[in-house]
Amino acid sequence: MTGTHTTGMTRRALLGAFAATAVTAAPTFANAAGFLRGAGDIRRLKMYSGRTGERIDMIYWIEGKYIPDAVTEINYFMRDWRTDDAFKMDLRNFDIMAAAHNLLNVNEPYMLLSGYRSPKTNAMLRSRSRGVAKNSLHMRGQAADLRLGSRSVSQIAKAASVCRGGGVGRYSGSNFVHMDCGTVRSWGG
């Protein structure tokens, strides 16, 4: 055969290398909404809750406008499952979650571990773990703890960090990533 070159790298290795660098090579924008602008005029969240058994696949933004009924459904889905208290979640966090999901190029829904937390739930969790903040952004509807079976904590955290929309915490030992729309910062390993 003429014109064939052997590089010592298989097609699978090449695709793996590309996938590993795709998230880190993405440009940085001031916030997650910048990543979603290029994805069309639709924003969507796909999640399920292992705690309640509920699933949601919701388009919550079309052509520059949030859809009130969809936002209400997502707010309820992200409620404190221990107390059944729902809260008006910060829309910026939806955008961070959706942008990170788009960057990861997966069809799999997020597993939601924690969305809104009532002060009662936060105090109970804080008494059991020093990793729970006293003034957690979960209590303000500005945070979510998420997991994907097909992506590592590191991959999810990189995608969320690239959005530069808020805080990103890596909890590798518990296999989840915290995303919030507070100050841009990162922690964990």
Image: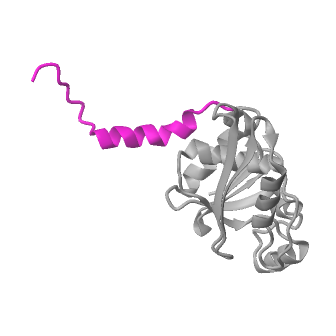
Question: On the rendered structure, is 42 left or right of 19?
Answer: right
Labels in figure, total: 0
Residue found at x 49% / y 38%: 21
Q: Quadrant of residue 111?
A: bottom right
The residue positioned farthest toward the left in the image shown: 1
Does residue 181 appear in this view?
A: no
Classify 16 as above or below 27. Answer: below
Q: Quadrant of residue 57?
A: bottom right
Does residue 153 appear in this view?
A: yes
Residue found at x 76% / y 59%: 74
Question: Magenta segment range?
Answer: 1-28
The image position of residue 49, as x and y in percent, is 66, 69
Q: Quadrant of residue 140?
A: bottom right
The image position of residue 92, as x and y in percent, is 80, 46
The image position of residue 75, as x and y in percent, is 81, 61
Residue 40 on the magenta segment: no
